[in-house]
Amino acid sequence: MAIIHHTTLKPTKLELLTDWLPTRPWYRGGPDAPVLTKSGGFRLEDPEGEVGIEFMVATDTSTPESTAYLAVLSYRGAPLDGAEHALVGTMEHGVLGKRWVYDGCHGPVLVAELLSLIEGKAQAHAQSVDGALDSEVVRSYTGAPFILDGFIPDPADDQDGTHLRTPHGTVLHLHRVLSPLPDNPPRRPEGAIGHVARGWQDPQGAELTAVFMTLRTA
């Protein structure tokens, strides 16, 4: 089980995201830097205990209409070979030392655990509480078992989010800009064979909910 250390981070996760988010094609902000607050999310466990995996909702309040982004982050104690283009930044962790923070969609550990969550084999964990499961995360899947031996993810970003082809002919779509839905929890989108959904709070404290990821046949 991963241990959540409540300690100092320099720079903080939100400071790293403030610089990184405007470089993404799905970023909706204006010319000024985003003003971010952490609004929710969940974690997954690396079975080997080496990689931190977090799905963070970061809300930008710099524009009249706030925008909630899904940041998919992996934390490593050493650089990931061949993933320089996916580096969000580095930070000094008060307990673990230097950590390399990546856009986790490029990492095989995060993608494998995310697909395991969708399939129902992995469980979502609370973002900030050691050992606690996150019962608010909803998932579904109606396809065949995933076989990921040797799979190296090669995601692509566009204005609609991040798209990732899996080895068995499906496409995982990560909704980077979250669109609140009236039903709670959100149902699986029409035509999808899998999804992950969760709620979060906007800066005014209102409870919102949305689909975070959708899995469809290619």
Image (tube, helix red, strand yellow):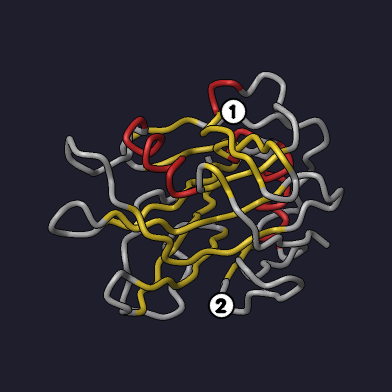
3 w.r.t. 172: above or below? below
**Badge 2: few (under 14), some or many (20 or more) residues near its Cα, within 10 Å?**
some
For the point 42% across and 51% down, the residue is: 175
Q: Nearer the viewer, residue 62 or 112?
A: 62
Helix, strand or loop at label 2? It is loop
Indicate the position of residue 68 as horizontal and vertical percent values.
34, 57
**Where, quadrant-wise, is the N terminus in this rendering?**
bottom right
Residue 57 place in picture, x, y as percent: 44, 59
Q: Is residue 33 above or below residue 54?
A: above
Q: Which residue is mark 1?
A: 154
* Amino acid type of the residue that numbered disc 2 sits on in the rendered structure: Glu
Residue at 83 percent across and 36 percent down: it is 149
Instruction: Identify the residue at horizontal 64%, vertical 60% (top origin).
Output: 43
Task: Give the alpha-carbon distance from disc 1 to disc 2, as whole Å.
Answer: 29 Å
> Which percent across, then down, holds residue 212?
47, 58
Q: Quadrant of residue 10?
A: top right
Name the mark nearer the viewer: 1 or 2: 2
The amino acid marked with disc number 1 is Asp
Q: Is residue 170 above or below residue 70?
A: above
Q: Mark 1 or mark 2, which has the lower sequence index?
A: 2
**Left of 42 or right of it: where is 51?**
right
Residue at the extreme left of the image, as rendered = 64
Q: Secondary structure at mark 1?
A: loop
The residue drawn where x is 53% and y is 32% is 89
Labelled disc at residue 101: none
Disc 1 packing (10 Å; few <14; some 14–19; many ≥20)? few
Closer to the camera, 117 or 147?
117
Q: Residue furthest right?
A: 48
- The residue singled out by tag 2 in the image is 136
User: Where on the picture, by quarter, is residue 83?
Assistant: top right
Determine whether, in the image, residue 216 is placed left or right of residue 124.
Answer: left
